[in-house]
Image (cartoon, rainbow, N blue to C red):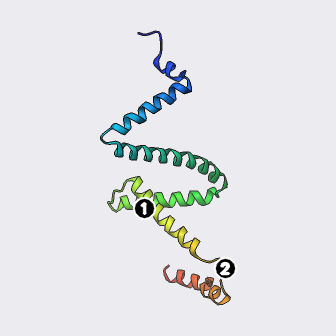
C-alpha cells in the first residue's frame, strides 16, 4: 500500500493543476461520440444541484413563515387521500401522489394569481363573486 493517499494528493493540487485537469476532461468530452447526451446529463445534474440548493434556502425560509397548523392539515389531507385510494384497491406511489397534488396546487395558485384582487374589481363584479354565508349553510344542511 502506498504511503500517499491519492485523495489527499488530489485535494492538495494547486488551482492551476485543477484547471489543467478540467481542460483535459473538457477536451476528452468534445471527442466523445455521445458528447451531446453527456452534456445534456451534465446540464440536468447542474440544474438539479442548483434547484436543490435553492430549495434548501426556500424551505428554511418558508418553514419559518408558514402557519404550521394549516400545513399539518394539508399534509394530513394528502395522507388521507392516499389511504382512501389504498382502501379502494388503488396503489399509487408516493411520487405519483405528490406529482398529482403538486400539479393541482400549481394550477390553483395560477388561478389565484390571475384573479383580480377585491380592490381591483368593480363593485358589481365584487358583489357577483361574494359568498353569502347563509347560502353556504343552506347547501351544507341539504347534504347532512
Q: Does residue 4 appear to the left or right of 70 in the view shown?
A: left
Percent x, y of residue 140: 53, 80
The residue nearer to you, when weighing 81 against 92, is 92
Which residue occupies 60% across, 88% down?
128
> Which residue is farthest left?
33
> Which residue is farthest right?
119
Percent x, y of residue 29: 37, 37
Percent x, y of residue 63: 62, 52
Percent x, y of residue 123: 68, 88
The residue nearer to you, when weighing 78 against 29, is 29
Which residue occupies 36% across, 58% down?
86
The residue nearer to you, when weighing 103 against 38, is 38
Near mark 2 (Cα within 10 A), the count class, few <14, some 14-19 or many ≥20, is few
Near mark 1 (Cα within 10 A), the count class, few <14, some 14-19 or many ≥20, is few
Task: Kindly state the secondary structure of the residue where label 2 is placed.
Answer: loop
> Which residue is farthest bottom?
124
Which residue occupies 34% across, 37% down?
31
Task: Kindly state the secondary structure of the residue where label 1 is placed.
Answer: helix
Looking at marks 1 and 2 on the same chain, the residue that comes earlier in the sequence is marked by: 1
Q: Is residue 42 above or below residue 88?
A: above
Label 1 close to label 2 by CB (< 8 Å):
no
Q: Is residue 14 above or below residue 22?
A: above
Distance Cα–Cα, label 1 vs label 2: 30 Å
The count of marks equals 2
Q: Is residue 123 above or below residue 49?
A: below
- Mark 2, residue position: 118
Q: Does residue 6 appear to the left or right of 37 in the view shown?
A: right
- Mark 1, residue position: 100
Residue 19: give its label.
none
Split into 4 quadrants, where in the image is the N terminus? top left
Which residue occupies 46% across, 28% down?
21
Q: Does residue 23 appear to the left or right of 113 in the view shown?
A: left
Amino acid at each position: 500500500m502506498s504511503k500517499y493517499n491519492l485523495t489527499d494528493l488530489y485535494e492538495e493540487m494547486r488551482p492551476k493543476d485543477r484547471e489543467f485537469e478540467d481542460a483535459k476532461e473538457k477536451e476528452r468530452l468534445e471527442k466523445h461520440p455521445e458528447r451531446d447526451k453527456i452534456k445534456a446529463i451534465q446540464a440536468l445534474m447542474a440544474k438539479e444541484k442548483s434547484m436543490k440548493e435553492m430549495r434548501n434556502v426556500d424551505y428554511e425560509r418558508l418553514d419559518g413563515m408558514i402557519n404550521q397548523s394549516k400545513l399539518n392539515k394539508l399534509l394530513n389531507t394528502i395522507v388521507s387521500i392516499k389511504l382512501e385510494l389504498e382502501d379502494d384497491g388503488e396503489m399509487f406511489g408516493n411520487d405519483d401522489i405528490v406529482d398529482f397534488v403538486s400539479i393541482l396546487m400549481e394550477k390553483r395558485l395560477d388561478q389565484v394569481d390571475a384573479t383580480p384582487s377585491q380592490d381591483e374589481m368593480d363593485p358589481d363584479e365584487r358583489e357577483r363573486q361574494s359568498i353569502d354565508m347563509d347560502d353556504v349553510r343552506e347547501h351544507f344542511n341539504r347534504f347532512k
